[in-house]
Image (tube, rainbow, N blue to C red):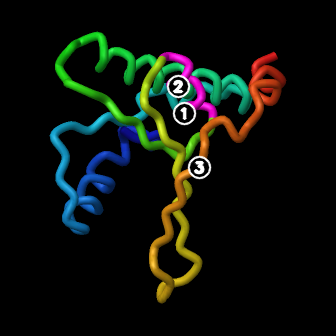
Amino acid sequence: MTGRHQDQETVIRDLLELKGYKFDRFFFNQMDRTTVIDEKSFLIKYWTEKVKLINEFRLSNEYKSIVVIDDDTIICSMLQKLNFEAYRVEISKESLTQTLSIAFNSPQKRLMTELQGICV
């Protein structure tokens, strides 16, 4: 599941396959790209839609368990509030020679007052 727009699906799938990753399903951002909205509205809609889709997976009872690993603090916090097992991850690579670095962090790092300030 990615925030990349569905127009990029072929490129993303090809890149993942090139790296040896195989997935049963892909979900791309389907928000309208032609409508101009402010950043706060976009982020709130993006966060809401992504969490809604993940919750639909749970409600479908198709999966025994769902663990979410995301780089977005807000999404992880929202999912934890809905009793999902969610982990926030930071992935970085400073140079071509550096090993890919993955660091798991607590999604609660960002205070809920920050989220409330963004949503107001």
Mark 1 vs 3: CB contact within 8 A: no
* Magenta highlight: main SS: helix
Gap in angstroms between the C-alphas marked 1 and 3: 10 Å
The location of residue 78, given as percent across then percent down, is 57, 23
Q: Residue at x 32, y 54 (%)?
A: 12
Camera-side residue: 76 or 46? 76
Q: Residue at x 19, y 65 (%)?
A: 20
Question: Which quadrant would residue 67 be assigned to in this image?
Answer: top left
Q: Circle 1 is placed at which residue position?
A: 76
Q: Which residue is drawn at 43% across and 25% down?
A: 84
Q: Circle 2 is placed at which residue position?
A: 80
Query: For the magenta stretch, what is the residue range?
Result: 74-82
Of the image marks 1 and 3, the number of the one nearer the N terminus: 1
Camera-side residue: 6 or 99? 99
Q: Is mark 1 on a helix, strand or loop?
A: helix
Q: Is residue 47 rendered to the left or right of residue 112?
A: left
Gap in angstroms between the C-alphas marked 3 and 2: 13 Å
The location of residue 58, given as percent across then percent down, is 30, 17
Q: What element carries label 3?
A: strand
